[in-house]
Image (tube, rainbow, N blue to C red):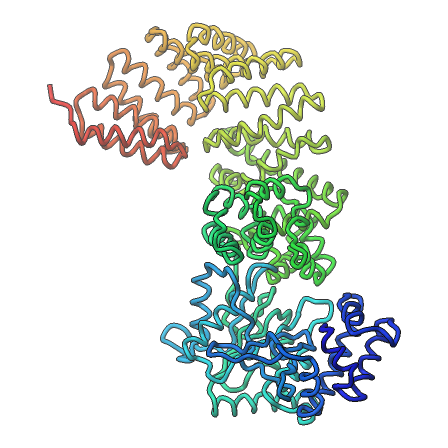
Amino acid sequence: MKAALLEALSAGAGGDAGRRAVAELARKLGLDGGASGREIAEAANDPAWRDAVREWGEALAELLSADPDGAAGAVARAMGSGTSASWYDGDHADFRGGVFLREVVGVQVVIQRGGAAVPEALAGLPPRPGGFTGREGETEALLRALDPAGESGETPAVLVAAVSGLGGIGKTALAVETAYLACARGWFPGGVLFIDLHGYDQEPVTSDRALQALLRALGIPPEHIPATADERVALYRSTLAGRAGERGAVLVLADNASSPDQVRPLLPGDGRHRVLVTSRDRLPQLGARLVSLDQLTPEEAYELLDRALRIGDPEDTRVVDDPEAAEQLAVLCGHLPLALQIAVALLAEDPGQPLTELVAELGESRDRLGQLDDGERSVRAAFELSYCRLSTDQARLLRLLALAPGPEVSDEVVTALVGAEASPVRELKALARAHLVERGSGRGWWRLHDLVRVFGVDVGSRDEGDAARERVLGFYLRCADLADDRLRWLQGMPVPERFVDRAQALAWFDGERAGLVAAVGWAREKRFAENAVGLAICLCLYMDWRRHFDDLIAVMTAARQAARRVGDGQGEAMAWNNLGHALREGALAEEAIEAQSRARDLFQAVGDGLGEAIAWDHLGLALMQGGRAEEAIVAHSHSRDLHRTAEDRRCEATALSNMGLALEEVGRTKEAITAHTRACDLFRAVGDRHSEGLVWNNIGNSLDSDGQADEAIKAYRRSLEMCREIEDSYGEGNALYNLAVTHKAAHRPTEARTAHLQAADAYTRANAPTEAARSRTRAAELEANPPLTP
């Protein structure tokens, strides 16, 4: 509200009607009749009086428009110098000196010196957005839709293009920038109508109010605007058709629409015109070309930070001086343009503040959304506008989705979150249309923007969230247990439920891996500890199979700590045992020895003989890795004896095979061959072809060490065959690598090089990049320097 306008009216510039209007506004605001224009203006800015001020503004607009040469001109002259609109050769009118009486940007009645109340909005675009960057693909898609050349061979012509996306994602900025580019190409000589529909405010602009505003903007006097909605639509479309014939096509930019009903009456009938709509919801009902916005890329976010800072101060080099901190800041802002712009404003307020300081403030804050507020713009407020429009079920689903473990969530996990029998498909689709949830990497997968997740957690309750997480953890434990059973299944054992084969179990684990790891992290809370420890144990074989040893270390560390806190000695022992295995695979021998020793002692303490035997076996492997092969032989012997006493032939075979490795390490090759052969026989007897295949590789190594190269090759080939049968890519890679080494020693470079290349491919599939690189290097060496034939 402008105090100058009120003072001009009080002074009589608008006649008695103007004085009465000021007095009426003061009364509405609870002020006495003697209040000054400045006092009234300050009170009018209070959001509590918003509706009263809007009604007053509409009445005043009609008063001034009814007498454009008299009252409006007198008011403009009384307001003094500096209020006239300056016109220039750019592509929009400069209304900086105008007085806007309505909230609808670009179509308000504007009082200008020299006389009339000017409803000139046919050049009403807002200024181009400062710091705009990226969005090349989306911009091109919109320009193709707006192109008056119309239909091409591949792209049909459309009347409407709709930009949709999360609040704060930059929809208006993209639409305005695209409109400027389209105007610069001369596509809309008839002008541009811009209207903000305030679709997500408490009281959106109705289509009828918007239509009346656009008619006035097109030069229709208020007294000539028809009384009925249908007649107003007809006049609007006929006026635009006439405009197209006289001046050319018009672009209508309808910003911030919340429903198709807000937009439909604003659609021209003449196909030469175009309509560009922005909305937080997808609006397929309009038959529009749909363009959805995602968060900026890291590179685009970095560029926005730098550009926007330099707008305020061209010498501000904080972003380029510390690109690492800028990258961290962009991540904390979720690469969301609104959040990035707010961060820039906060930095601009304090030119001496290093980026690292703001990064630390945001990273350490328990209220990151509260920090992303510059006094005028707020990320939380932007999200609240969308949240308030949700139904009860939709709002609950958003809150629960914010708690989901992992960056994406499957339909199954969503079902567990809400505690339903089936996935809440309708609510999910509604949230997707509102861009509060996004489709994930595949059908049936969903994800939230990072800051939406923070918002969802903020608006949720502890009890609601804990109950949902408990349901998810229970679901994960049941399914992971069944998938683990399938991976361990051997012929003759009861067939596990749910997963029909190993491949299906692995696929489920692969899809849910990030969520499973995150869910185990909940073990730090006492109420989730038991199930989280159980879940961690179910992940061990899978993570070993896929060689996700960093994840395995993380989940087993969390599991052992949780088990210790709640006094679960058995669970702690199992976690230490699996942690030791992961540490050994990570080449951390001393840490692995410590972990396996702890596991052995804990198993002894709880009286678990089988667990103790397994821990002894794993301790032997860690000791051998640490260069203590003789001690390893003793450890494996303990394991073998315990398993033999328990008549567990499969575990006895494992201990024998590992003992063979240690025996070979100390040069006792014949004994190693005997141990491996006995292990192979036991695995065959219990139907474990996978383990048998791995032992054949060990037999090959021992035979090769014993000078039996031809027999070694036969053993490697048997191992290769079985590993391929089981789809064990890492075992396949080991067999091929050893074949290559043996072929090279036998002066068969072609076969050796082929085997190395095949090994590299197998290792790559097994997520073993170090081994893959080693094989490629050996193959390249053979090609460059083939060994001489003896």
Taking 691 as reference, is 64 above or below it? Answer: below
- Residue situated furthest right in the rendering: 32
210 or 120, which is in the foreground?
Answer: 120
Indicate the quadrant containing the N terminus: top left, top right, bottom left or bottom right.
Answer: bottom right
Task: Please give left or right for residue 239 compared with residue 365 in the image.
Answer: left
149 or 20, which is in the foreground?
Answer: 20
Task: Please give left or right for residue 216 compared with residue 579 in the image.
Answer: right
Which residue sits at x=69%, y=50%?
A: 399
Which residue sits at x=59%, y=23%?
A: 575
- Residue situated furthest bottom in the rendering: 224
Taking 116 as reference, is 516 above or below it? Answer: above
Task: Say whether residue 297 is visible.
Answer: no
Indicate the quadrant containing the C terminus: top left, top right, bottom left or bottom right.
Answer: top left
Q: Position of residue 561 (x, y in %)?
A: 64, 24
Taking 764 as reference, is 79 above or below it? Answer: below
Q: Position of residue 664 (x, y in %)?
A: 35, 10
- Which quadrant would residue 185 be assigned to in this image? bottom left
